[in-house]
Image (spheres, rainbow, N blue to C red):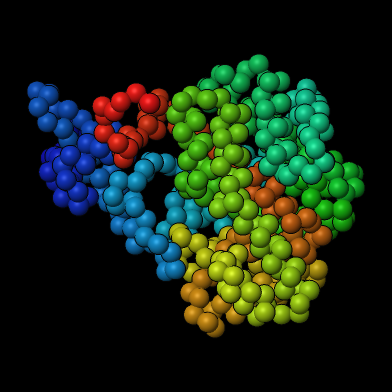
Amino acid sequence: MNDESGERRIGTQEAARLLGVKPATVYAYVSRGQLTSRRDPVGRSSSFDAREVEALARRSRREAAGPPGFAASAASAGELSVRTALTLIESDRYYFRGVDAVELASRYRYEEVAEWLWTGTLVRGARFTAPPESLAAARRAVAALPEHSGPIDRLRVAVAAAAVADPLRFDLSEPSVLDSARALIPTLVGALPEVGPAQWGGDGRLSRQLWPRLSALDPDPDALAVLDLALALLTDHDLAASTLAVRVAASARAHPYAVVSAGLGALEGPLHGAAGRLAHRMLVEVLERGGAAPVVAEYLRAGRRVPGLGHRLYEGEDPRATALFARLEPLAQAGPALGAAREVAGVMARHGGGLYPNVDLALAVLTVSCGMAPEAGETVFAVARTAGWIAHALEEYEERPLRMRPSGQYHGPRPPRPLP
């Protein structure tokens, strides 16, 4: 049936059939925010947007199948799914608001890509500026940390300090959140300690501001272009663990600084943010030992996953890795690390690994060849993804509050039990 606007509506039984679940599970999807329902005028039954149901069914089938080499997802059994208009991943490509993300990132700078993701408008020449008060507070807070603190430690502290310095942080209107975002990202970069010549960070472009925080080497224009491309490519990537954490925080109406803190907390997990560091160290070892075969053999012998290979959303090579490898190819200093990465992938392919290079391996080529520390990839990832986290927070602020509240499945002893 169609409603007055021409939207095709279906009943509970038909929705259950399309999803391959029981009717009761359809209402569980509604309670989790995965589907929206509408009561009929009498109030005795519900109807659902047919396109929304079909999209959920497609996502469930795709995630349940999964790419080769990875375990099937539990999405078809009711795993949380979130509607978003930001990033689409399909057929080994990904899109920002319907535009090919690789093409967008290859043509426009990180700040311009961020503006597109936030507003759907391309702002040519966009620049982000850190307010002096916020930057000073963030730098003081970061300077007080122990010397061995990692990049995510520093960024989390910088976010907290910047939040306290912003009295308007609780204003969740879109203009205010965007103002906070445009100030926060350069504040995070400016709060990191410098390891290279500071004069390279002064022209306002975020990649130039970030470079002396990552490398002591003077950057050439081509190397800076690769760093900017990496930032733009990593701006968003659908519902990664850190992005889901951000959406949960935004669902509770946490302010933008708090939602970024939630994302950084999830990013620091060893299964999410540490992959770039591991790939960097692997490439260094391959270069030191003169070949990938013995290094890969030791990883496999120890039962460890070879870092930088495979992605659950892509059957072939990660398109972000493909774009970065192509931009790294002309860099003379990237030759050895790029060769090492390709040798690792080749060794795995010869032995039927079925896994292709992902963006962590490409980031590792950049960090190794430009004299950056192993954790530099984490810094690039976190700074870049902050823009995506803000975009998801803006979407979530428009949804029903506290909708990210799944029901627990209790498996403990049944009450009543005697008081301990």
Check the image and report above or below for 332 versus 108: below
> In this view, which residue lies farthest toward the bottom?
350
Q: Residue at x 46, y 46 (%)?
A: 239
Relative to 279, is 17 on the left or the right?
A: left
Q: How far across and how far down the image is residue 302, in percent?
A: 59, 70
Check the image and report above or below for 31 versus 344: above
- Residue 34 in view (yes/no): yes
Relative to 391, is 7 on the left or the right?
A: left
Check the image and report above or below for 164 versus 387: above
Q: How far across and how far down the image is residue 322, in percent?
A: 59, 66
> In this view, which residue lies farthest toward the top?
167
Q: Nearer the viewer, residue 146 or 313?
A: 146
Q: Quadrant of the N terminus?
A: top left
Q: Residue at x 52, y 25 (%)?
A: 254
Quarter of the image where one finds residue 8: top left
Quarter of the image where one finds residue 176: top right
Q: Residue at x 57, y 66 (%)?
A: 304
Relative to 160, is 221 on the left or the right?
A: right
Q: How far across and how far down the image is residue 145, in percent?
A: 78, 34
Q: Residue at x 30, y 36 (%)?
A: 413
Check the image and report above or below for 336 versus 235: below
Quarter of the image where one finds residue 189: top right
Q: How far across and how far down the image is residue 247, in percent?
A: 47, 35
- Residue 324 in view (yes/no): no
